[in-house]
Image (cartoon, helix red, strand yellow):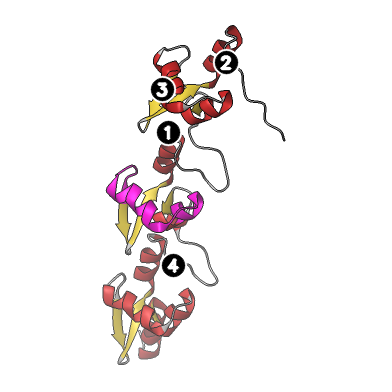
Amino acid sequence: MRESESTMEETKATMSVRTMRDLLGLGKTESYWLIKKGYFETTVFDKKLRVCVDSFEEWYDNQSRYRKVNGPAPLSAGDSTMTVAEMSKELGISCSTARFLVRDRKLIKYRIANGLMIIDRADYERWYRSQFSYHKTLGEPPGQAYPASMSAHEMCDLLGIPLNNTGYALIRRHLFDSFMVDGQHRIDTASFERWYRKQSHYKKVERSE
């Protein structure tokens, strides 16, 4: 192969740091930070540092932090995974609270990729459906893994009774079905309505619209 052809093949297999930077819409400092971290292979050609295209594309498809300015999203950015930052936004909570739930309380499994906490969306959805403390800003309500229910506070508000005495007394008497989630009583709505219709002592509070 002639020298010019060899040079052409070399440049096709690599790209300049500036090209990589423009591709991701990064500043100079962050682009060299990626190189320093060794996320993809580099080489020196004609006394200039160049990024190996195949290695770069492999790294790109296995991370979710960076997006090409004009080009496809990385393969790992599909619906199967999400970052803890994306979780916090979806639930309308702070990133520190989301990290606490995932890392400290270990409610959802996670892995670290390119400095980001990545969780499996299926695991996240299973956790979401099994709890009532956190609500998505948009989308279905939590607790879908259980029958329709209300909290002990909601039941007491509905009947206009105090929780600490009367409310807990009703629950302890097993007049209707209840279950515990995260240490909190949940009242089965259908069971409660059946009990309510059979008794006359308690009346639902009428609320003006």
Mark 4 or mark 2: which comes first in sequence? Answer: 4
Q: Nearer the viewer, mark 1 or mark 3?
A: 3
Q: Main secondary structure of the magenta part?
A: helix
Q: Is residue 117 above or below residue 69?
A: above
Q: Is residue 171 above or below residue 125?
A: above
Mark 3 or mark 2: which comes first in sequence? Answer: 3
Write down the residue under mark 1: 130
Q: Is residue 1 left or right of residue 163?
A: left
Q: Nearer the viewer, mark 2 or mark 1?
A: 2
Query: Are the two marked residues, 4 and 1, in contact with CB atoms closer than 8 angstroms?
Result: no
- Disc 3, SS: strand
Mark 2 or mark 1: which comes first in sequence? Answer: 1
Hey, what amino acid is under mark 2?
A: Tyr
Q: Residues within 10 Å of mark 4 (few under 14, many from 20)?
A: some
Write down the residue under mark 2: 202
Answer whether residue 145 is visible to the viewer in this image.
no
Q: Residues within 10 Å of mark 2 (few under 14, many from 20)?
A: few
Task: Give x and y (percent) for residue 172.
Answer: 39, 16
Q: Is residue 142 above or below residue 51?
A: above
Q: Which residues are magenta?
A: 86-110
Nearer-the-camera pick, 121 or 138: 138
Task: Give x and y (percent) for residue 56.
Answer: 37, 70
In space, the residues marked 3 and 2 are separated at their CA atoms by 22 Å
Label at residue 179 = 3
Q: Residues within 10 Å of mark 3 (few under 14, many from 20)?
A: some
Write down the residue under mark 4: 66
At horizontal 34% and vertical 81% (from top left) the residue drawn is 32
Query: Are the two marked residues, 3 and 2, in contact with CB atoms closer than 8 angstroms?
Result: no
